Amino acid sequence: MRIGLISPPWLQVPPPRYGGTEVVVDGLARGLVAAGHDVLLAAPAGSTCPVSLVPDMPEPSAGSSATWSAATELYHVARAYAALTDVDLVHDHTVAGPFFRYRRASLPVVTTNHGLFSSRLGDLYRLMGPDVSMVAISHRQAADAAGVRIARVIHHGIDVDAVPVGDGRGGYAAFLGRMSPDKGPREAILIARQAGFRLLLSARIQGPEEQEYFDSWIVPLLGPEVEFLGELNAAEKYELMGGAAAFLNPIQWPEPFGLVMIEALATGTPVVGTGSGAAPEIVDDGVTGYLRSGIDELAKALLLAPGLDRAACRRAAELRFSVGRMVADHVSLYQEILRDGRPGQSPGSSAPG
């Protein structure tokens, strides 16, 4: 197949540092090419994903991503579809793209919702026409998609072979994510402090709200046992995760997936976090981590986590969250669409944990 991929306009593919959707698009593009397909990727200028790239795309607009600039994304989408005229199918990872009317009428389009169906985004997707096939990224996310026809549930995957296995002997717990209350960095500090663990935090701070949260709630808690590392690149991120006795993920919202959890598992590090969102589909409680609620219970779980089998964590990432599995799931969907038109509703091939 010849497949067109459209990434969001906010960050390059792969992202230079912190990124979520862009990491997934990068892995999917590389994996499709490795599986023998032709890929044309529409991504912001400066992207280095080693596949064919649409030329002359706009520069990345990370400064707008926090508020979602409609003009920025629409311009990005228009440039993308103008270039993707000779493909069999387009997989669009933007919000506006599936609604773009000036694409070829017969062009099959797949889109992935990287957010919540229970938000205004879900209301938007309920207006989407039958000519677009929707991919959900977890069963928990899809459970809120009433009125939206889900073609597949496909869990994210990463290039596990490229992730170094750590030994977990750093003697610390790790946190990595955005500097947002939803991600739980303050809760991570409180959990580690109660359990008597040193905590290393890495986070991207974007926009005045995240800066205010950091200054007001995180800075007063920093000290010898709580160190803020700033934003890390990929190699630094995996070094941080791999050296940790446990990875703290006390998310405070129903996150649709949680890429950092599978990255931690790939390094062999167990995950300790809340059971919100898709976490139960990723973490096998008592095997690859612990899912609990409340600071006290999470602190107790953190004390137990170093006793879990790190090889089991790595094995879970290899078997369930690899790029190869993610690509195979998407290829199956693409082939069904091209063979039969719009696919029937399916529970998908990525089973819950």
Image (spheres, helix red, strand yellow):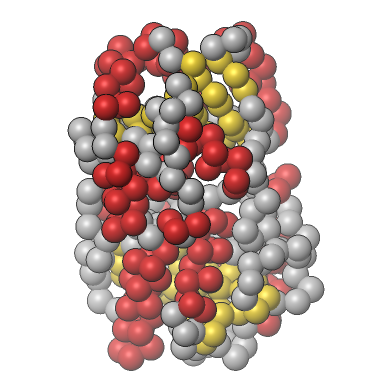
- Give the camera-side residue of 201 and 209: 201
Residue 48 seen from this side: yes
Count of numbered badges drawn on the protein: 0
- Give the camera-side residue of 320 and 250: 320
Against 103, is 210 above or below?
above
- Give the camera-side residue of 165 and 20: 165
Counting from the top left corner in percent of width and height, residue 41 is at 61, 74
Counting from the top left corner in percent of width and height, residue 295 is at 34, 15
On the image, which quarter does residue 86 sit in?
A: bottom right
Against 121, is 231 above or below?
above
Against 25, is 117 above or below?
above
Residue at (31, 18) in percent of width and height:
303
Q: Tell me: 18 left or right of 273.
A: right
Against 251, is 119 above or below?
below
Q: Tell me: 201 left or right of 154.
A: right
Counting from the top left corner in percent of width and height, residue 22 is at 57, 57
- Give the camera-side residue of 126 and 53: 53
Q: Tell me: 132 left or right of 200.
A: left
Residue at (35, 73) in percent of width and height:
328
Counting from the top left corner in percent of width and height, residue 353 is at 22, 48
On the image, which quarter does residue 26 sit in?
A: bottom right
Residue at (22, 52) in percent of width and height:
352
Residue 143 seen from this side: no
Residue at (38, 68) in percent of width and height:
324
